Image (cartoon, rainbow, N blue to C red):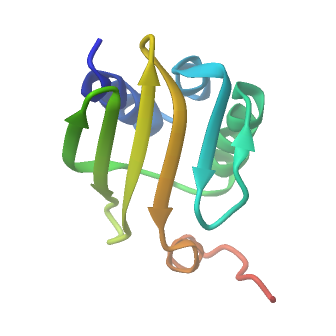
Amino acid sequence: MKPKEIVEKWVAAFNQADIEALAGLYTDDAVNHQVNTDPLEGKQAIKKMFTDEFAHAEMVCLIENIFEDGDWAILEWKDPKGLRGCGFFHIVNDKIRFQRGYWDRLSFLRQQGLPLPTE
């Protein structure tokens, strides 16, 4: 599959809050680095992050653009509440090996009515 197709599958699983399907898209040693937090290493850590986040927030990813360059796909997204971001996905053998995301965590927490950091 092309990297763009893998990211389209990722978005579909994300929008269904299908944690098993999401986890299945990553390599066992994948790294997910949302730049407003520390990087997560390994499929199990990534799966736990999705489990925790879907338990506390209503998240939807609307595709604005997906770009592809070699084994990389770049997702530009928004959500229904106005949050915007982008993600970079390195795809190896039809699995996400590395993901980096850029989005405003403070805006997300406010929109979701979640506690704000005190630091």
Residue 109 position in % (x across, y down): 60, 74
Q: Horizontal and vertical percent for residue 92?
A: 46, 18
Residue drawn at (24%, 35%) of the image: 69
Considering every residue shown, the one lying at the far right of the view is: 119
| Residue 72, x across and y down, in percent | 34, 34
Asked which quadrant contains residue 88, the reply is top left
Q: Is residue 7 left or right of residue 16?
A: left
Count up the numbered dots. 0
Residue farthest along the bottom direction in this orientation: 118
- Percent coordinates x, y for residue 18 in the rendering: 53, 28
10 or 89: nearer the eye?
89
Quadrant that contains the N terminus: top left
Residue, x 30% and y 30% (percent of image)?
8
Query: In the current view of this chain or complex, which residue is farthest to the front?
Result: 70
Q: Quadrant of the C terminus?
A: bottom right
- Taking the spot 51% from the left edge, 41% from the top edge, the residue there is 99
Against 103, residue 27 (above or below) is above
Residue 16 position by quadrant: top left
